[in-house]
């Protein structure tokens, strides 16, 4: 007489002999091992269990409610060994071998910082190796982005400095040379840094609170945080001027790219269009920076001090709004469509010019 | 080494191609695919087919949708994506080319 064990296969209840149960459990465990590292492992396991359940059904009838060990054996034979698609050897010789073949499968192209040949932290060198272009080009692009975005590019560099791992081993250095970029790695790292950062700031905040409790609020703080009333009244005005300037800049840019002229003023024939665009962008940043400074200043002088997330969402909403307007405009205004079509060659000309410049400098 | 062992590697490589062909012809679920293959030299088992199908789905060649069945739980019915169709066309061309090459060389 054999003991009967009830099992649950993907929501279906079955009764098995004890030895049949052992064999099935062994089969499913080996399947799980074989699928180690497979992103769809859970789903495949459910599929396999369902397939086994379907096969069990075949052996059961009105007067037979237990699947025997011999029947389980036959089912397992029908199911066959788990062959992952990557297992080229076909012999499935233990988990270790399969694991190895999975790790070597597909060159893991990754982005690393390269400390050798670095000027600051090797972000540019790593990017250049990853993109397969000259380091100098990447550096120049970074400087231009930093100037045009008024320092956001520098923040970007600092962020990448923390997020992108440094190539330490020879293997990592080889991987930095140009293999696919492992996004998961970057996200994991960013999460880790974020968690560490929040822990750090929470600690600081608690210390600050303790300090306040003991010593009272810093003297004069309520006065220092009081908002100058004039700036508050002028804030909408500044925003309006800012918007107006932006529209003027955008209109000039479109006109410049499409016709090579702004209000009858033509670019000199020896100045390429991309240079005109760059000058326009830099000029706009210079004109707008005092207005922006006033806006920032008045934000920071609010009595409660607007939190950082406000600025963040402000920027996000602004970007989404701009993208939407741009999309509508590109569908309905032919000038805008022309502008967009003319942009890619412009970028190419710019890149070519920079490349020529770099090769001459060498 | 028997003749069929000699061609084991070839059969293995061709399995994905055949599955593309079967899925292209009809909306099928796994038992249908196994039945179609079992009549051929390419008889395959669940242990091989499920991982292969999940890989093909990750590669964007096939996709499935759940459909109620008359008996038992709902089943995954597979169909080709547009990428799967274009890859099948390419494989078909390549196969014809291979055939021509084999027929041309010697006799």
Image (cartoon, rainbow, N blue to C red):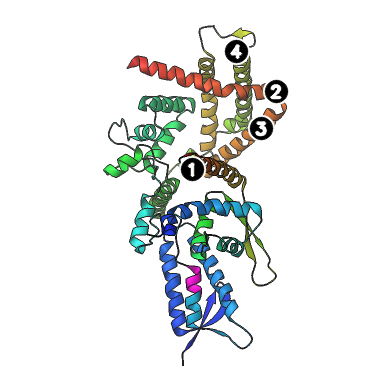
Region in magenta: A75-80
Q: Chain of mark 1?
A: B
Residue that numbered label 2 is attached to: A334
Residue that numbered label 1 is attached to: B102
Q: At 47% from the left edge and 56% from the top edge, which residue is drawn?
A: A39
The answer to which of A55 and A16 lies nearer the viewer is A55
Numbered label attached to residue A260:
4
The CA span between labels 2 and 4 is 17 Å
Q: Please state the horizontal and vertical placement of residue A223, each as a whole percent of the image.
A: 49, 40
Give the class, few, some or many, for how many residues have Cα within 10 Å of label 4's Cα (few <14, many ≥20).
many
- Disc 2 or 4, which lies upstream in sequence? 4
- Whether label 4 touches label 3, CB < 8 Å: no
Q: Chain of mark 4?
A: A
Query: Any magenta on residue B96?
Result: no
- Whether label 2 touches label 4, CB < 8 Å: no
Residue that numbered label 3 is attached to: A327
The CA span between labels 4 and 3 is 23 Å
Most distant residue in the top direction: A269
- Whether label 1 touches label 3, CB < 8 Å: no
The answer to whether A118 appears left or right of A155 in the picture is: left
């Amino acid at each position: 007489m054999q003991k009967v064990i009830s099992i649950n296969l993907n929501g279906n209840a079955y009764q098995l002999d004890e030895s049949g149960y052992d064999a099935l459990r062994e089969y499913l465990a080996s399947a799980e091992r074989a699928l180690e590292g497979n992103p769809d492992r859970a789903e495949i396991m459910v599929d396999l269990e369902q397939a086994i359940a379907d096969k069990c059904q075949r052996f059961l009838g009105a007067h037979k409610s237990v699947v025997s060990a011999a029947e389980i054996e036959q089912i397992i034979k029908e199911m066959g060994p788990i062959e992952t698609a990557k297992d080229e050897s076909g012999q499935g010789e233990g988990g270790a071998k399969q694991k190895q073949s999975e790790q070597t499968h597909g060159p893991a192209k990754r982005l690393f910082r390269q400390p050798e040949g670095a000027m600051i932290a090797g972000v540019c060198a790593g990017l250049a190796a990853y993109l397969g272009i000259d380091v100098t080009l990447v550096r120049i692009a970074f400087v231009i982005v930093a100037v045009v975005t008024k320092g956001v590019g520098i923040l970007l560099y600092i962020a990448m400095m923390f997020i992108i791992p440094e190539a330490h081993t020879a293997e990592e250095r080889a991987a930095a040379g140009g293999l696919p970029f492992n996004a998961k790695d970057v996200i994991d790292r960013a999460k880790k840094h974020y968690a560490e950062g929040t822990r750090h700031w929470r600690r600081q905040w608690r210390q600050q609170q303790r300090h306040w409790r003991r010593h009272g609020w810093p003297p004069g703080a309520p006065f220092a945080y009081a908002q100058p009333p004039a700036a508050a009244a002028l804030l909408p005005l500044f925003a309006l001027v800012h918007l107006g300037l932006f529209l003027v800049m955008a209109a000039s840019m479109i006109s410049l790219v499409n016709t090579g002229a702004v209000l009858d003023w033509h670019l000199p024939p020896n100045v390429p269009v991309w240079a005109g665009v760059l000058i326009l962008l830099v000029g706009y940043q210079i004109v707008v920076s005092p207005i922006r400074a006033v806006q920032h200043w008045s934000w920071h002088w609010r009595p409660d001090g607007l939190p950082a997330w406000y600025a963040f969402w402000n920027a996000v909403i602004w970007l989404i709004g701009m993208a939407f307007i741009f999309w509508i405009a590109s569908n309905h205004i032919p000038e805008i469509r022309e502008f967009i079509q003319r942009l890619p060659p412009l970028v190419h000309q710019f890149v070519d010019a920079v490349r020529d410049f770099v090769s001459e400098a060498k | 080494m028997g003749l069929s062992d000699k061609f084991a590697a070839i059969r293995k490589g061709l399995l994905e191609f055949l599955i593309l062909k079967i899925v292209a012809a009809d909306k099928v679920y796994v038992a249908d695919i196994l039945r179609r293959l079992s009549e051929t030299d390419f008889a395959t088992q669940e242990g091989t087919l499920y991982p292969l199908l999940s890989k093909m789905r990750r590669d964007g060649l096939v996709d499935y949708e759940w459909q109620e069945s008359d008996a038992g739980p709902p089943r995954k019915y597979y169909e080709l994506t547009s990428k799967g169709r274009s890859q099948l066309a390419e494989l078909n061309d390549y196969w014809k080319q291979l055939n021509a090459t084999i027929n041309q060389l010697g006799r």
